Image (spheres, rainbow, N blue to C red):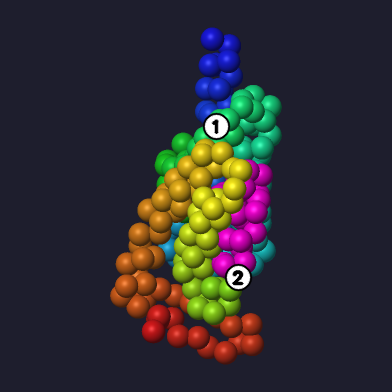
Amino acid sequence: MLEGMAIALALVSAYLIGSFSGALVLAPVFGVSDVRDRGSGNAGATNAWRVGGRAYGGAVLAFDAVKGAVAAGFVSGLIAPDLPWPYACGWLAIAGHVWPVFHRFRGGKGAATAVGVFAILLPLALVVGCLVFAVLLAWRRIVSVATLGGGAACVLSACLVPGLPAAASGLAVCAFALIVYTHRPNLQRLAAGTEPRLARRDGHKVSQRCP
């Protein structure tokens, strides 16, 4: 009974930690209004960057990644370290970011929180995913394309690396499925050729439409 209560506590705690949205918690610090009412309407690092600038976007990215790492590492390790509970805690942290109980269930898309979760539970898969993300971002200049491509690379890595438990590939697949789900508007804009690109560092104006 005590073990069951500990597992339940870990799972609930992971979700609640994920429910603290960096974009909304840090908004008053940077003097930014609710990003869900501006830009893409998403409470995530990319929209925070576009709405409030690099410092705000970077802080949101770090906040959301750290909470994923805390939920997957500290909380699960302290309360429910046995398989598959750390992986379940990781997924619940991502779900909490997407559907945060503290912010009327309107959160972000889960990618930054997944980075923190994978850093603790699937570091090799994260490295592969980040490399693919960087290549796609440099090539296409579209954050959503880089995010989805990097996520797919994480899944393949988690499934192909020998010795990992089934819960590891399960987390990777479920996390990627959730991120694809939250990127539905981006996929629609990509299909329509209207997904925005990042500006280049040299100041060269880049078309806001996909070719």
Q: Is residue 178 left or right of residue 118?
A: left
Q: Which residue is the site of mark 1?
A: 84
Kindly state the secondary structure of the residue where label 1 is placed.
loop
- Residue 178 in view, yes or no: yes
Q: Farthest front residue?
A: 162
Q: Residue at x 61, y 55 (%)?
A: 126
Report the side of 197 relative to 6 (left or right): left
Give the percent coordinates (x, y) of residue 39.
45, 65
For the residue pair 105 and 121, the one nearer the viewer reads as 121
Residue drawn at 67 percent across, 30 percent down: 77
Across and down, in percent, residue 107 comes to: 46, 48
Q: Name which residue type carries label 2.
A: Ala
The quarter of the picture where residue 124 lies is: bottom right
Point out the image quarter for the C terminus: bottom left
Residue 208, above or below 49: below
Mark 1 and mark 2: Cα distance apart in space: 30 Å
For the residue pair 184 and 176, the one nearer the viewer reads as: 176
Does the magenta stretch mainly form a helix, a strand or a loop? Answer: helix
The part of the image, by quadrant, that contains residue 128 is: bottom right
Kind of residue at disc 1: Pro
Residue for badge 2:
134
Whether 115 is among the magenta residues is yes
The secondary element bearing badge 2 is classed as helix
x and y, in percent, of residue 29 in the image = 65, 53
Residue 48 seen = no
The magenta-colored residue range is 113-133
Q: Residue at x 62, y 31 (%)?
A: 76
Q: Nearer the viewer, mark 1 or mark 2?
A: 1
